[in-house]
Every structure is written in structure tokens, then in C-alpha cells.
Image: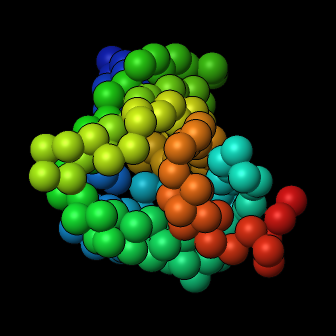
Amino acid sequence: MRDVHVSAREVAEALLDETGRTMIDGDFDGFARHFSLPLMMETFEGKQTLDTIERLKVTFDGAYEFYTRHNVKELYRHCVDAQFRDPETIESTHESRVISHGVLIIPPFPVFSVIRRFEDCWKIIKCSYAVSEADDLNRALLAQTAQASV
């Protein structure tokens, strides 16, 4: 049964909390269950379509390696706005802050996401990252660009 009283912001914030925690913990299975395949992913550097779990894993591993290399133990992400576009689709923008030892290691950056309802769960179907001063994070997010450009 669908909960019609859940706000778009509550859905987006729950996904932010869960995906942030699983990324920092290196829990790919926990992370992956919140994404639909194919997943559209883009940065200023390019875009790709992740159409298999293996391709999602390569991108996850690249981002996890970036966070591990920089000793990131905290991703502070807050929802700036989330709106239903239709009963099954949410468009959301959040700001990400990547923190190591209490210090912001790159400037905060916005992320736009499209979230869709699948039966009784919500999954992210598109992510657009506006990371301007972290080329290595952009490369990690597009780990398969050469193979998967669209």
C-alpha cells in the first residue's frame, strides 16, 4: 500500500541518508538497492548510462576510493528542494559537503536527482553532479565514460 502522506522532501532525504551512509561504509549492496538501472549519471565532464549492476559497481568503487583516499568519514548532504512532478516522479536538488577530519575538502556542490516510485519503493533514476573543483571526483563518478558515453 502506498503512503500518500509522504512528502517529496521526506523521500529525497531518506535516500540521501541511506546512500550517504552506505557509500561511507563501502556497502555496495545497500547502496545499489536505491538506484534503478538504467541510471543516467552526468557531471561537467560528461554523462553515461549505467545499465548493469557491474557498471554501477565500477562507479561506486571509484567514488568510494576517492572518499577513502581523502579519509572522508562524513558526507553532509541536505535537500534544498524536492517536488513531485507526477505521483510517481520526484525531482530533487541537494547540496553535498565532503568532510575529512572536520574539514571541508572540496567546495560544496549541488546535485539534481530524479527519483521514481517502483511498486512500494523509491529509486534514483538520474543524477546530475555540479562538482566544479574536484576533477578526481568527477573522473570517479564517470569511471566508465570512455565505454559508456551517450
The percent position of residue 29, horizontal first and vertical second, equals 35, 73
Q: How many marks?
A: 0
The percent position of residue 133, horizontal first and vertical second, equals 53, 44
89 to 101, vertically: above or below: above
10 to 124, vertically: above or below: above
Viewer-closest of 97 and 35 = 97
Name which residue lies at 37% across and 25% down: 79
Viewer-closest of 32 and 131 = 131
Name which residue lies at 50% across and 31% down: 110
Q: Is residue 16 left or right of residue 94?
A: left
Viewer-closest of 28 and 73 = 73
In the rendered image, which quarter is residue 106 located in?
top left
Locate the N terminus by quadrant: top left
29 to 137, vertically: above or below: below
The percent position of residue 72, horizontal first and vertical second, equals 24, 58
The furthest residue to the left: 101
The percent position of residue 69, horizontal first and vertical second, equals 32, 71
In the rendered image, which quarter is residue 27 located in?
bottom left
